[in-house]
Image (spheres, helix red, strand yellow):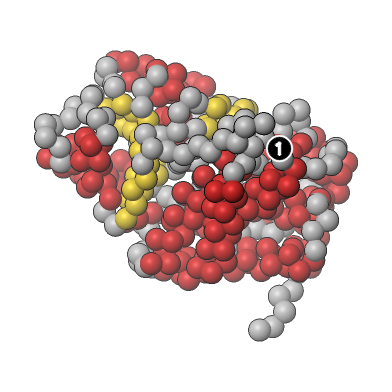
């Protein structure tokens, strides 16, 4: 099996980075008419900066149109974006907002064969750098992964936007990034295919490991600053961990049980109001239980989740008192054919997953941090 490492063409991050969007795109030759797919909050925050950067930031003004994102990364929304891009004769699609807005914009750009520029306004998940969109039904249930041909030509993260988003999004990004190393090491050890169909590289594994180390070292301090809307070096490191390291790590090393558990959890409508990274964090706990990880390692994850406000129980995901049939439904969805849980180095079935879910929930409920 060949080794494959996949990444965006360019990555730009920092305070008021949106001001550099026009010049950066100009340097990369992305100067045609632009369709910006924007979540409402992103448009409110960035509309003025777009006007300035596209009218003054490059040698000549760039025509751009804004398409308001409908809220769900569904086939219907992707078709609406594709139609808007055709109407605007867009040569580039820019996505601005959270994971779903970016995923829908990326899928539409792929359908049209035009370059995609990714502008996350929150550090809430590992999607911005990838060549993968997660497609949901109109009702918010996981439907499929759509692999697109190319990673974004440019990922531009405006740290000023990230610290103005709700802090809960930042925490969720840490939950998603927490999974990166645990899933990567399982995939590397098992020599299974990564998201691009190749073996992992030392580079991808090292990035996943750095992601984990950064979370543990800087996570709580960064969250504290973000709660006050402040940008510090710890915040910048965490934005990079949640966005770049987690994105490169998962895509080029691979996913395992944690993300499959996330997909399984979406089968229970009670979890729909919870964020991707919140469900993934519980997926990490479940994966460690399923893999028979040492209790010190599980305690480390429990403590980190508690420190940064991530759920450690089913009740924390809206499933308090859920009966066995709900857990069974989640477990069956988790082990659906093609799911990344089958990257685990042993055969996994729904009964094992249901037990691991309930055992992880029990550990979360019983966990009492040791003093000091
Ligand atoms: Zn994820």
Q: Quadrant of residue 200?
A: top right
Residue 166, relative to residue 31: is it above or below? below
Q: Position of residue 204 (x, y in %)?
A: 56, 47
The residue at the far bottom in this view is: 372
Q: Disc 1 designates what residue? A: 192
At x 76%, y 69%, the residue is 296
Q: Nearer the viewer, residue 172 or 347?
A: 347
Residue 128, relative to residue 170: is it above or below? above
**Residue at mark 1: C-beta within 8 A of ligand 1:** no
At x 72%, y 55%, the residue is 285
The answer to whether one can see residue 172 in this image is no
Q: Quadrant of residue 65?
A: top left
The answer to whether one can see residue 196 in this image is yes
At x 72%, y 79%, the residue is 370
Q: Position of residue 16 (x, y in %)?
A: 26, 53
At x 79%, y 39%, the residue is 331
Q: Position of residue 318 (x, y in %)?
A: 67, 50
Query: Split into 4 quadrants, where in the image is the N terminus?
Result: top right
Q: Nearer the viewer, residue 168 or 190?
A: 190
């Amino acid at each position: 099996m060949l080794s494959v490492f996949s990444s965006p063409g360019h990555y730009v991050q920092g305070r008021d980075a949106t001001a550099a969007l026009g010049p950066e795109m100009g340097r990369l030759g992305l100067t045609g008419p632009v369709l910006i797919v924007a979540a409402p909050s992103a448009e409110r925050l960035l509309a003025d900066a777009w006007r300035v950067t596209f009218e003054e930031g490059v040698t000549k003004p760039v025509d751009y149109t804004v398409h308001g994102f409908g809220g769900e990364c569904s086939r219907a929304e992707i078709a609406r974006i594709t139609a808007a891009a055709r109407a605007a004769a867009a040569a580039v699609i820019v996505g601005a907002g959270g994971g779903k807005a970016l995923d829908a914009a990326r899928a539409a750009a792929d359908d049209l064969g035009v370059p995609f520029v990714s502008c996350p306004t929150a550090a809430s998940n590992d999607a911005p750098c990838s060549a993968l969109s997660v497609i949901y039904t109109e009702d918010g249930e996981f439907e499929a992964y759509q692999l697109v041909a190319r990673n974004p030509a440019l990922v531009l993260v405006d740290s000023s936007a990230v610290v103005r988003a709700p802090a809960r999004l930042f925490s969720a990004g840490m939950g998603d990034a927490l999974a990166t190393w645990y899933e990567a090491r399982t995939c590397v050890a098992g020599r299974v295919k990564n998201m691009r169909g190749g073996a992992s590289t030392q580079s991808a594994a090292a990035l996943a490991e750095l992601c984990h180390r950064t979370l543990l070292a800087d996570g709580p301090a960064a969250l504290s600053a973000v709660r006050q809307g402040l940008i510090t070096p710890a915040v910048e490191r965490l934005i990079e961990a949640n966005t770049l390291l987690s994105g490169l790590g998962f895509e080029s090393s691979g996913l395992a049980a944690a993300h499959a558990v996330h997909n399984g959890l979406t089968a229970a409508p009670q979890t729909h109001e919870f964020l991707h990274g919140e469900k993934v964090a519980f997926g990490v706990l479940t994966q460690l239980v399923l893999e028979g990880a040492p209790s010190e390692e599980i305690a480390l994850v429990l403590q980190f989740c508690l420190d940064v406000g991530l759920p450690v129980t089913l009740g924390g995901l809206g499933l308090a008192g859920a009966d066995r049939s709900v857990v069974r439904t989640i477990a069956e969805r988790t082990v659906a054919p093609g799911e990344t849980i089958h990257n685990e180095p042993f055969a996994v079935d729904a009964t094992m997953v249901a037990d691991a879910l309930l055992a992880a929930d029990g550990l979360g409920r019983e966990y009492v941090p040791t003093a000091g």
